[in-house]
Amino acid sequence: MSNSGFELGLDDPANAGVFAVTDGDLPALAAAARDVGLRICRVDLEGCHDKRTLLARLAAQLDFPAGFGGNWDALSDNLTDLSWLPADGYALLFSDADDFYHAAMADFSTLLDILEDASRAWAEHGVPFWAFLEMDDVEHDPSAGNA
């Protein structure tokens, strides 16, 4: 992996999306994202085994506004708004995503869909929105759609 966010294309909304990364990649991605001016949001999924816990962790880490509905529609709405977190772009770094994947495969798939939709929505506005999910087994690569 390169040390430059520009070489990775992190500043280009057309490149953005949802990607699986291996253990140890998140610190370098965080540094590269920071270097190109993206807001970094870390979400620890260790021990996350259900949708309710996932949504609570996302709401806390992204400082969702009071009244967050705690459902998939509300997550989608918040991820495509983020007006309370103004930035030139976003990089969501999910550590230990395998825990959630193995515990709640259907919910994991829904999360990937919502993240992909958010990335596409932001790209339409010229804003890069990345989601990197740290997974032990990258054969479950979210970007390939076979998670």
Image (spheres, rainbow, N blue to C red):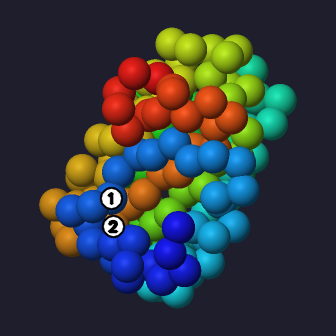
Q: Is residue 101 above or below residue 88?
A: above
Label 2, on which residue?
Answer: 128
- Residue at far left of view: 124
Q: Is residue 22 above or below residue 114?
A: below
**Left or right, 32 with reference to 81:** right
Q: Position of residue 22 (x, y in %)?
A: 63, 46
Marks 1/2: CA–CA distance: 6 Å
**Looking at the image, can residue 35 be seen?**
yes
Q: Residue at x 68, y 35 (%)?
A: 136
Label 1, on which residue?
Answer: 16
Disc 2: CA contacts within 10 A as few (<14), some (14-19) or many (>=20) = many
- Residue at far front of view: 1
Which mark, by number, is residue 83? none
Q: Is residue 85 above or below residue 100?
A: below
Q: Position of residue 133 (x, y in %)?
A: 57, 44
Q: Residue at x 37, y 38 (%)?
A: 143
Contact (Cβ within 8 Å) of mark 1 with mark 2: yes
What residue type is disc 1 on?
Answer: Ala
What residue type is disc 2 on?
Answer: Pro
**Left or right, 135 with reference to 145:** right
Taking depth in this image into account, of 44 and 31 the one nearest to the observer is 31
Q: Residue at x 52, y 86 (%)?
A: 35
Quadrant of residue 48 within the rendered picture:
top right
Q: Position of residue 24 (x, y in %)?
A: 72, 56
Q: Earlier in the sequence, mark 1 or mark 2?
A: 1
The residue mark sitting in front, 1 or 2, is: 1
Local secondary structure at mark 2: loop
**Looking at the image, can residue 59 be seen?**
no
